[in-house]
Image (tube, rainbow, N blue to C red):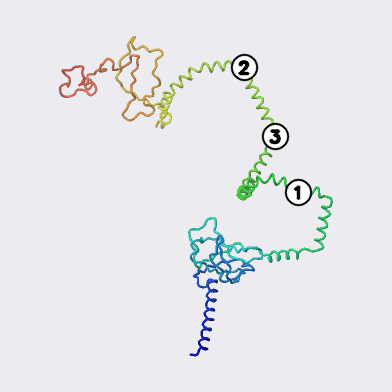
Amino acid sequence: MSRDALRTLAGVATILMIAAIVAGAVVLFRGGTAETVRVTVLSPRAGLVMGPDAKVKLHGAQVGKVASIDSLPDGRAAIHLDMDPSALQLIPANALVDIASTTVFGAKYVQLVPPEHPSAESMYAGQVLDAKNVTVEINTVFQQLVSVLSQIQPEKLNETLGALAQAFSGRGEQFGQTLEDLDALMVKLDPSLSNLSHDIAVAPHVINAYADSAADLVSIAENATQLSDTIVDHQQDLDTLLVSAIGLADIGNDVLATNSAPLTNVLHLLVPTTDLTNQYNKAITCALAGMEPLATGPPQPLPGVMLLNSFLLGTERYRYPGNLPKVAAKGGPQCMDLPNVGFDHRPPYVVTDIDANPAQYGNQGILLNADALKQALFGPIDGPPRNTAQIGQPG
């Protein structure tokens, strides 16, 4: 191969190598070789200066870029994001999205904002997010301003401005004083703004409570109206009642004033009786409770009086002077298991110091000749007497 051909091939190879280096640098700069994950953001609008390669930021750091923007039939914009896979673990799945810009005329970018309560899940591939806020653009402001101005008639605006100028003419000092007073009022209200905000926040709940109770409140108002009408209709009767009450109070005052000393003496005389009654409260209570079954029991099957009688062995007779009652005896109230005495039980016998004890002599009570009693009741009985050798002892 000739020297000229070699030079030509070397030049072409050099040009191709330089082109490859430049193309590789461009691809690396645009991130063409980096691995990305696609995430979609639905926004009311994308903004004027929003296009592919716009940055996606989290806390000011870039975590992706805008791949493309599609217009949806409902007027919204679908912004497709190429996210860095290593950054998805740092972004919560419920992250908020804002379409922001550095200045009013600056380029737009996608700002990811962590929520107040981030979720435990991280952002994943194919996730669809909703953009809540889009930075207001100057063209939007101009468009709204033009729409407002188009509704204003110049002649009426001139009349309004003229009326305002005439109203403020010569009243600058009063207007300035009004502004100063308003400023002083705002200074006084400023410490209470937090309370005012709280009142405004809870006002809906209070209003709803009043709304739920409106029917009852109306009923109360109607009943109060009827009550007041009734009082007005019976005004004369009410006056008579008050006059009678005043007369009764005067009579009662005279009676109490005249008999105050006797009533006081009666109360003083009743003190020992009431003290004794209070001391024997338990005994009186159980005695009355013991009589309750007699009062609440079923009536007799036939009218009249039912009499139950029986023979009981007599107790030891009282002896003089050992069994004389003791004056000022003490011992307190005795309830004796009343009012409920169990089956096959009997109230205990209280042995006091007045020498009335049925077992104090050790006797066996009244002794009967049982065999003679049987002969008297049932007639002659066959066989010999059972207690022939023990006449007078039970047989």
Residue receiving disc 1: 179
- Residue 185 sits in quarter: top right
Taking the view exactly as shown, the residue that stands out farthest to the bottom is 2
In three-dimensional space, the C-alpha distance between marks 3 and 1, rounded to whole angstroms, equals: 57 Å
Residue 172 % position (x, y): 81, 50
Q: Disc 2 designates what residue?
A: 258
Pointer 3 local density, CA inside 10 Å: few below 14, some 14–19, many at least 20: few
- Towards the viewer: 236 or 86: 86
Seen at 48% across and 18% down, the residue is: 273
Q: Residue furthest front?
A: 3
C-alpha distance separating marks 2 and 1: 76 Å
- Mark 2–mark 3 Cα distance, whole angstroms, equals 35 Å
Tell me which residue sits at (52%, 81%) in the image: 14
Q: Quadrant of residue 330?
A: top left
Instruction: Estimate the x, y position of residue 116 in percent, counting from the top left.
Output: 54, 55
Quadrant of image for the C terminus: top left
Residue that badge 3 annotates? 235
Q: Of circles 2 and 3, which is in front? A: 2
Q: Eyeballing the image, is 297 above or below 89?
A: above
Q: Which marked residue is nearer to the observer: mark 2 or mark 1?
A: 1
On screen, residue 195 above or below 138: above
